[in-house]
Image (cartoon, rainbow, N blue to C red):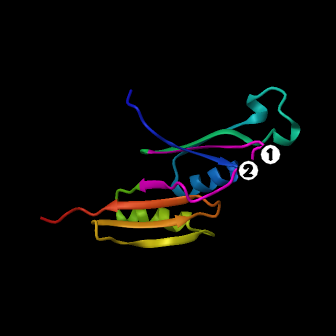
C-alpha cells in the first residue's frame, strides 16, 4: 500500500446535497453513511445528516461529512480540489457541470506552462481547479 492524500470536505448539514451534485457532475461511485444509521442515540434532528460520504472515480476521491451545529464550518479560499483531466473534453465537461450556479474564477484556457487550465468556486463555496497537460509536439 502506498501513502496517499485525499480531500475531505465538511458541510453545515448540506453534505448529501453537495455530494449528490458532485456525483451528478463527475460520475463515479457515491457511498453515503448517515449518523442515524451508524451512531446510537443520535438526536432526531441529526438522524439524516451525513457521517461519512465517499465519491470515487478513476483516481478522483472526494470524502465529506456534515459537522455538528455547535461547530459550524467557515468556508474560505484556503484550499481547492484539483482534478487532472485526461482530455480537453473532460476538462470542459467537469468545468461546465461544476460551475452551474457557481462562479468562474478563471475560464478554461491554454496557459503559458503548457496546460489547459481553469478554476471555479461551486455553489457550495468549494474551489475547484481543472488541468489538462497538453501533449508537447515534437
Please say whether residue 87 is one of the residues in the magenta stretch.
Answer: no
Residue at 65% from the left image edge and 56% from the top image edge? 75
Which class describes the residues within 10 Å of circle 2: few (<14), some (14-19), or many (20+)? some
Image coordinates for residue 25, horizontal then vertical, percent: 55, 58
Work out how far the residue at label 1 is from the one at label 2, CA to CA, in angstroms: 7 Å
Image coordinates for residue 78, horizontal then vertical, percent: 54, 55
Which quarter of the picture shows residue 122?
bottom right
Which quarter of the picture shows residue 39?
top right
Q: Check the picture and name the quadrant holding the N terminus.
A: top left
Secondary structure type for disc 2: loop
Residue tagged by mark 2?
12
User: Relative to residue 120, is residue 42 drawn left or right?
Assistant: right
Q: Give the range drawn in magenta.
A: 60-83
Mark 1 and 2 residues: CB-CB less than 8 Å, in contact?
yes
Label drawn at residue 46: none
Image coordinates for residue 24, horizontal then vertical, percent: 58, 56
From the viewer's perspective, is residue 82 above or below residue 115? above
Residue farthest to the left, as pictured: 138
Among the two numbered marks 1 and 2 on one chain, the one whose residue lies closer to the N terminus: 2
Secondary structure type for disc 1: loop
Residue situated in front as seen by the camera: 51 or 73: 73
Residue situated in front as seen by the camera: 113 or 88: 113
Residue at 28% from the left image edge and 66% from the top image edge? 113
Label drawn at residue 69: 1
Q: Check the picture and name the quadrant holding the C terminus.
A: bottom left
Residue at 87% from the left image edge and 38% from the top image edge? 44
User: Relative to residue 134, is residue 10 drawn left or right?
Assistant: right
From the viewer's perspective, is residue 112 above or below residue 10? below
Amino acid at each position: 500500500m502506498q501513502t496517499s492524500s485525499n480531500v475531505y470536505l465538511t458541510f453545515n448539514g448540506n453534505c448529501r446535497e453537495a455530494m449528490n451534485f458532485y456525483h451528478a457532475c463527475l460520475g463515479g461511485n457515491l457511498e453515503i453513511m448517515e449518523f442515524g444509521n451508524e451512531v446510537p442515540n443520535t438526536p432526531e434532528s441529526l438522524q439524516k445528516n451525513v457521517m461519512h460520504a465517499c465519491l470515487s472515480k478513476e483516481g478522483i476521491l472526494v470524502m465529506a461529512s456534515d459537522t455538528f451545529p455547535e461547530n459550524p464550518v467557515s468556508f474560505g479560499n484556503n484550499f481547492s480540489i484539483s482534478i487532472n483531466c485526461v482530455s480537453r473534453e473532460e476538462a470542459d465537461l467537469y468545468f461546465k457541470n461544476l460551475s452551474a450556479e457557481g462562479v468562474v474564477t478563471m475560464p478554461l484556457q491554454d496557459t503559458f506552462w503548457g496546460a489547459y487550465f481553469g478554476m471555479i468556486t461551486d455553489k457550495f463555496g468549494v474551489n475547484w481547479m481543472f488541468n489538462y497537460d497538453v501533449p508537447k509536439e515534437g
